[in-house]
Amino acid sequence: VDLPVALDKLRSKFGIRKVMPEGGGTFNGSMLHEGLVDEISQVIVPVVDGGGTEVTGVFDYPGDTPPKATATLRQVSHKTLPGGVNWFRYRVVDKGGG
């Protein structure tokens, strides 16, 4: 799927200007790689799941590991929620740094 074309079609045909992708690490990494991510909302819950090595990360960058950060983030907000949960919002300030 050509992600920029798909998003352009959503905008032109349906007027959709914002999307909240909820894919896995591969989809999220592809969106980030294409420079299509403006903001990241991350919730950290104080639990450990014990996942194995086959578990993907939040952003799995396609291809070889980039020589430097894939994107630079700037914290926009932080809230501490009940139960020690932390909610961070970040603005992507440098897209596709790899």
Image: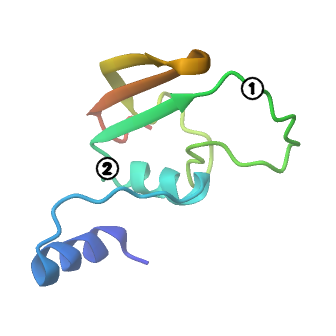
Q: Position of residue 65 (x, y in %)?
A: 61, 40
Residues at discs 1 and 2 in contact (Cβ within 8 Å): no
Foreground mark, 1 or 2, reads 1
Kindly identify which numbered label has been placed on residue 35: 2
Q: Position of residue 10 (x, y in %)?
A: 22, 76
Is 80 left, or right, of 83 in this rendering?
A: left
Give the camera-side residue of 48 and 58. Answer: 48
Of callouts 1 and 2, which one flags the residue occurring earlier in the amino acid sequence? 2
Q: Quadrant of the C terminus?
A: top left
- The residue tagged 1 is 47
**Residue 87's quadrant in the figure?**
top left
Residue most extreme to the bottom = 13
Q: Residue at x 42, y 50 (%)?
A: 33
Q: Position of residue 90 (x, y in %)?
A: 34, 28
Q: Position of residue 37 (x, y in %)?
A: 32, 47
Question: What residue type is disc 1 on?
Answer: Val
Q: Is residue 87 above or below residue 63?
A: above
Crowd band around label 2 with a 10 angstrom C-alpha radius: few (<14), some (14–19), many (20+): some
Q: Residue at x 57, y 54 (%)?
A: 62
Say which element carries label 1. Answer: loop
Q: Residue at x 78, y 48 (%)?
A: 55
What scheme was used to colour the molecule? rainbow
Q: Is residue 96 above or below residue 82?
A: below
Q: Quadrant of the N terminus?
A: bottom left
Q: Residue at x 79, y 28 (%)?
A: 48
Question: What residue type is disc 2 on?
Answer: Gly
